[in-house]
């Protein structure tokens, strides 16, 4: 009735899902809208780790949860939402998804993330399924990349668990050139001018862009913010451009905000003051007036 099939459970280390679907999301879709199915093939001998890149809202996290739920349902003896499914026995399913702190224990988002990652690498085996979503995002970019890179290497070399790793760190795609059991996948998108269409399809390869600015635009950030972010991004992508230079440059390419225009008017008024004909008291009063106006505009 719902397109579920009886999965095959065997003693292999393969997870092969054809046209798999998320059992919860597909039931919550509006009438007439169909869930986009995806294939999955994991094998400790050849396709142990999938590094999955793609923009926010593209479906990376849903795909990870989908594979986890199908694997769990199969081990429960349930039919699964797929065209076919072959699931090699899994002893444990580990997940590291979401971003939250632990206020009662005084743990930051990053510390919670690291505690959970530590539990995974200390308990996972070659029979486990590991689902990692954005490891390392709670700290600086370089620290995050380094931790995510080292963690992926450790799972590949020491643990051998079947792993799906969704990340924004495109640098991790380079791991596939060094380790034969690491494969690159991406969530496909299509660009139409300045618009981005998410296809929610997981395919081999790696994402060239994060599309963060486009997603921010879709979320409703002001045009001035989007324009300024676009200029900064272009500068950051240039060789020999550090963050400080990129942020300082490009102001002339962006439409001036209302506050910036008022600042310019204030500067113009100061330049036009003829202090030679003003008494000391008049000059002090004018200075106090200008100072107060500046405070008002910054509120």
Image (cartoon, rainbow, N blue to C red):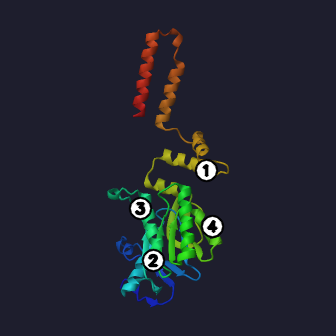
Judge by depth and name the residue closer to the eye, 190 or 178.
178
Q: Earlier in the sequence, mark 2 or mark 1?
A: 2
Q: Position of residue 163 (x, y in %)?
A: 51, 75
Q: Nearer the viewer, mark 2 or mark 4?
A: 4
Task: Please tell me in which quadrant of the rendered image residue 248 appears.
Answer: top right
Q: Which residue is mark 1?
A: 236
> CB atoms at circles 3 and 1 under 8 Å apart?
no
Task: Classify 10 Å Cα crowding around label 1: few (below 14), some (14-19), many (20 and above).
Answer: some
For marks 2 and 1, give the CA distance: 36 Å
Q: According to the image, label 3 marks what residue?
A: 112
Q: Quadrant of residue 249?
A: top right
* Above or below for 167 versus 14: above
Q: What is the C-alpha distance between the residues marked 2 and 3?
A: 24 Å
Tell me which numbered mark, 3 or 4, is placed earlier along the sequence.
3
Q: Which residue appears at 45% of the width and 19% of the height?
A: 287
Specify which label sits upstream in the sequence, 2 or 3.
2
Return the x and y of residue 107 as percentages of the image width and height: 38, 57
Q: Secondary structure at mark 1?
A: helix
Classed neighbour count for the residue bearing mark 2: other residues with Cα under 10 Å, few (<14), some (14–19), many (≥20) = many
User: Marks 3/1: CA distance?
Assistant: 31 Å
The CA span between labels 2 and 4 is 24 Å
The correct choice, above or below, for 257 with respect to 23 in the image is above
Q: Give the Cα distance between marks 4 and 1.
A: 21 Å
**Helix, strand, or loop for circle 3?**
helix
User: Badge 4 local density, few (<14 within 10 Å), some, or many (20+)?
Assistant: some
Residue indicated by mark 2: 67
Tell which of 288 and 112 is nearer to you. Answer: 112
Q: In the image, 59: left or right of 171?
A: left
Do the numbered discs 3 and 4 sit on residues whose CB atoms are within 8 Å? no
- Look at discs 4 and 1 and give the one toward the viewer: 4
């Amino acid at each position: 009735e719902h397109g579920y099939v009886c999965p095959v459970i065997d003693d292999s280390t393969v997870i092969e899902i054809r046209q798999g679907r998320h059992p919860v999301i597909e039931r919550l879709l509006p009438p007439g809208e169909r869930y986009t199915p995806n294939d999955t093939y994991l094998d400790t001998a050849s396709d142990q780790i999938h590094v999955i890149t793609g923009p926010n809202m593209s479906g990376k996290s849903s795909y990870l949860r989908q594979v986890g739920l199908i694997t769990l349902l199969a081990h429960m003896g349930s039919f699964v939402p797929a065209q076919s499914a072959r699931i090699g026995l899994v002893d444990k399913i580990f997940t590291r998804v979401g971003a939250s702190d632990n206020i009662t224990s005084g743990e930051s988002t990053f510390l919670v993330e690291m505690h959970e990652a530590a539990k995974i690498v200390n308990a996972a085996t070659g029979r486990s399924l590991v689902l990692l979503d954005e490891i390392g995002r709670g700290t600086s970019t370089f620290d995050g990349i380094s931790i995510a890179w080292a963690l992926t290497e450790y799972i590949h070399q020491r643990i051998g668990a079947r792993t799906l790793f969704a990340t924004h760190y495109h640098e991790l795609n380079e791991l596939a050139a060094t380790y034969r059991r690491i494969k690159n996948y991406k969530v496909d998108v299509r660009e139409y001018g300045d618009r981005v269409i998410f296809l929610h399809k997981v395919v081999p390869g790696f994402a060239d862009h994060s599309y963060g600015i486009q997603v921010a635009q879709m979320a409703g950030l002001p045009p001035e913010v989007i324009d300024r972010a676009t200029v900064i991004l272009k500068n950051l992508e240039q060789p020999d451009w550090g963050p400080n230079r990129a942020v300082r440059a490009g102001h002339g390419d962006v439409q001036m905000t209302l506050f910036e225009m008022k600042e310019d008017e204030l500067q113009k008024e100061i330049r036009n003051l003829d202090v030679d004909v003003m008494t000391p008291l008049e000059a002090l009063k004018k200075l106090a007036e200008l100072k107060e106006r500046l405070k008002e505009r910054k509120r």
